[in-house]
Image (cartoon, rainbow, N blue to C red):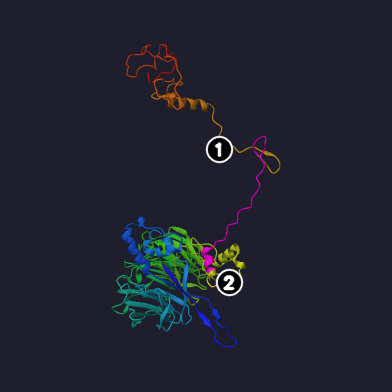
Amino acid sequence: MEAESKALIVSSRPAGPAAVPEQKNLQKAIVRRTVDYLCPYLKYFQARLISPSIKDASQLQPTYADSFELLPPAAYLHQPASSLNTKLATAALGKARSSVNAVLWTPDGRRCMTGGANGEFSVWDARTFAWESVLQAHEAPVRTMAYTHAEHMLVSGDDNGRVKVWSGRKDNFLDPLHVFASHREPCRCVAIAPTDRKFASASDDSTIKVHDFAKGAVEATLMGHGGDVRWVDWHPWKGLLASGSKDALCKLWDPRQGGGGCVATLHGHKNGVMQVRWNRINGNWLLSASRDQLIKVYDVRTLRELATFAGHTRDVTSCCWHPHHEQLFASGSHDGGLAFWLVSHPQPQAQVQGAHEKEVWALGWHPLGHVLASGSGDHQTKFWCRTRPGDLFRESDASGPGAPHVTGAAAGPAAPAALAAAAAAASGLAAIPGLAAIPGLGDVLAKVQVPAAVPPPLVAPRPLDPVRGGLRGRDGRDTPPPMDSRKRPREPGFEREWERERDWERDRGLPPPHMRGGPPPFDARGPPGPWGPPPPRGPDPFYDRDPRDRTPPPWGDDWDRPGPGPHGWGEPGGPRDPYG
């Protein structure tokens, strides 16, 4: 759930001879957006007591009132599209303008940390997105950061090839513990083992090194790539490493076997692999982003490609799995665009074109999954949240040429400013002088007023032909009336067969006509049908018999001898009655 607070700044001129008494200058309202993660969980715990099953949960309606009923992503596991974070919450700019190369959320979800090209750690509040502190951590640009699972240590790497280990964040302070001079070239990524005893680092020197926290030394060096190793990721619960390199290969490693620990090589991309990510929910899918504008998902159980996703127009520079939805992941490209994907759908479910002015280097989901943080080369860290029920998908201040534009499954109506202008013009409010000076009225029109639909022009019907009953065409010729689809031409003998079936429905207890060789006689003993009582008829020695009478008919049991039947039963060469 999202709560917005606006502060209206009012400034007054000092009193003087040229000053107008009681005149104030109204400035633009400053929007400070707050994304609260506590209220949805309180609502979620209350809903679990009332609705023990997801089938009993109430459905949200597209109105602003239902924003208070919005639950966290963990409550919508059956609806991954509810976590397409296409709404810009805020854009944070650090004190020193530098490229943002790494984005990391603290394990408790209270803060977001970013690593810049100036070697600084910047800390932002996770609820109000306000800047908290900055720390000069490295002498070179920071490339990667990772927290241990126990939340007691932080590992970071820089362009000098050094890896620093920091103590857990306590009282807004990070204390350096140890420095590893692991590589001679930039350290691109670090990955923590599930046991928190070891970590791996990838570098541009084509190697992956496994370090031990207790010993403070390098245990193993994995070699096998033919180019810069851009990324490495440790399996969520197994001793298995995945790496992506500039040689367009993805490799799986056993960290216990040293230099010869390559388990498998995945050939799928045609250009350098920028990032690889394990799926933290099932542990079987490996996500890879490459400079060939493709994203691939591999299944390590079969060592085969599971799906390929094409939608970016430039190099795919970053990717990240959602922490709660198994199939949902986000990706960023070199042109500054964001895309949201589902593994079961090859097309992007939502795209934010122009989310950043430059390449997106880092993506990170909040541990709860309701906010996505993106770091870019345009010196900005942007936070993206879920759209609320009833929201328009394009912000009122996003009307410039470089503003983000949402397309795909999350594409919505026109901008609120355009809707406000159209609504004002349609309702006649645009002619009121001083309308634009009223603050906030344009937003109200954008959210409430909707342009009236213009009815189509009326067209006079064509005259009917008085003779044939059809329509007279534009050239003056007569057009025959259209034939009703229910009045199709009937087959020959259709009415006769219809009458026979109708008689059969009326004469209950008799065999159908097609099994007697002729139309059935009427039975006066049966109930009257819907068409009235049956007409009288003469006696019949066969059909007037009692069915319980086992005596032979008057003509005997020999069916080859002619008998007195009314329909010629028993005549030589004639049909036999199976009901005799």
Residue 412 placed where, x, y %? 51, 62
Q: Is residue 529 above or below residue 81?
A: above
What crowding class fits label 1: few (fewer than 14 Cα within 10 Å), some (14-19), or many (20 or more)?
A: few
**The N terminus lies in quadrant:** bottom left
Helix, strand, or loop for circle 2?
Answer: loop
Give me the disc on residue 397: none
The image quadrant that residue 515 belongs to is top left
Q: Amino acid at mark 1?
A: Ser
Left/right of residue 235 with respect to residue 483 in the rendered view: left
For residue 436, the mark is 2
Examine the structure image and report whether residue 433 is included in the region drawn in magenta: no
Q: For the residues marked 1 and 2, what is the alpha-carbon distance in whole angstroms?
A: 59 Å
Would residue 13 be seen by someone viewing this image from the given angle? Answer: yes
Give the residue displayed 62% in from the left and 38% down from the top. 481
Question: Can you tell which quarter of the image residue 101 is in?
Answer: bottom left
The picture places residue 280, in percent across and down from the top left corner, at 36, 65
Quarter occupied by the C terminus: top left
Q: Amino acid at mark 2?
A: Ala
Please determine whether, in this image, residue 128 is positioned above or below residue 388.
Answer: below
Name the residue that disc number 1 marks: 485
Observer-nearest of 404 and 265: 404
Q: Judging from the image, what secondary structure is the residue with disc 1 in?
A: loop
Q: Which residues are magenta?
A: 442-470
| Residue 465 highlighted magenta (yes or no) | yes
Secondary structure, magenta segment, majority class = loop
